[in-house]
Image (cartoon, rainbow, N blue to C red):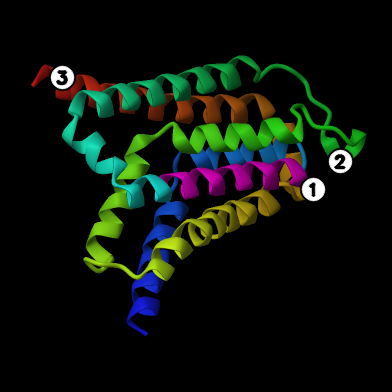
Amino acid sequence: MATFSVLLGIMIAIGIGAMSPGPSFVLVSRISVGNSRLHGLAAAIGMGLGGAFFAVLALAGLVTLLEKVEWLYLVLKCAGGLYLVYLGIAIWRGAREPIELASANGRGSISVPRALVLGLVTQVSNPKTAVVYASIFAALMPQEPPLALVLSLPPLILLIEAGWYAVVAIAFSAPRSQQAYLNGKLWVDRLAGAVIGALGLRLIGESLAVLRR
């Protein structure tokens, strides 16, 4: 019962974190509304895989290394920020390009595998997520966790992350959402690009602020 209580607490904490707005939400919603439900679900799976990856890192203690070797964490943080800035610029630049929704022609503006990769890369581009996972684990896990608890965490986190973003994908791939996107594609894409780019600049700014200390 104690193991179940610990697992439930971690799952709730991770679920709340997954639901908080960020570049992952923006990306999945945009892929879903601009392509198809299948594309959005692929991106959701990519997000889940990224969450499981961070869970494995936290359980392996590699996050502790990042916290102790500050320059390595800052390098990864800057790299993640640069990727988000690049992604934001790409979305902004493509705002004026017309698209034909996948529901009409059976295809999306990107392939389904690419949607999955975009979800995965966007999720792992923010090393702060790894630190959040490690903090949750440190706060809620027992000092000597049972093997069953350790083995169950990565797949359950994959399900939670992918499950939440699957809900996002289903909501934004509905015909009404897609039609609304077509009507305001220019400004929707520019807003999405600006948000993702701003989050990337924030990561870079935080890293530079630490270096100036």
Specify start and end residues of the magenta stretch as a single range. Answer: 37-54
In the rendered structure, are the residues bearing label 2 and label 1 in contact, judged by CB atoms less than 8 Å apart?
yes
Q: Residue at x 67, y 34 (%)?
A: 115
Q: Secondary structure at mark 1?
A: helix
> Is 144 covered by the magenta stretch?
no
Q: Residues within 10 Å of mark 1 (few under 14, many from 20)?
A: some
Q: In the image, residue 136 lies at what x, y percent? A: 29, 58
Which residue is at a point 69% across and 30% down the rendered structure image? Answer: 114
Q: Which mark is residue 13?
A: none
Sequence-wise first label, 3 or 1: 1
Q: Earlier in the sequence, mark 2 or mark 1?
A: 2
Q: Quadrant of the N terminus?
A: bottom left
Left or right: 184 as drawn, with respect to 128: right
Mark 1 = which residue? 175
Kindly identify the amino acid type of the residue bearing the numbered disc 2: Ser
The kind of residue tagged 3 is Leu
129 above or below 193? below
Q: CA distance from mark 3 to mark 2?
A: 48 Å
| Disc assigned to residue 211 | 3
Determine the main secondary structure of the stretch shown in magenta. Answer: helix
Relative to 13, residue 32 above or below: above
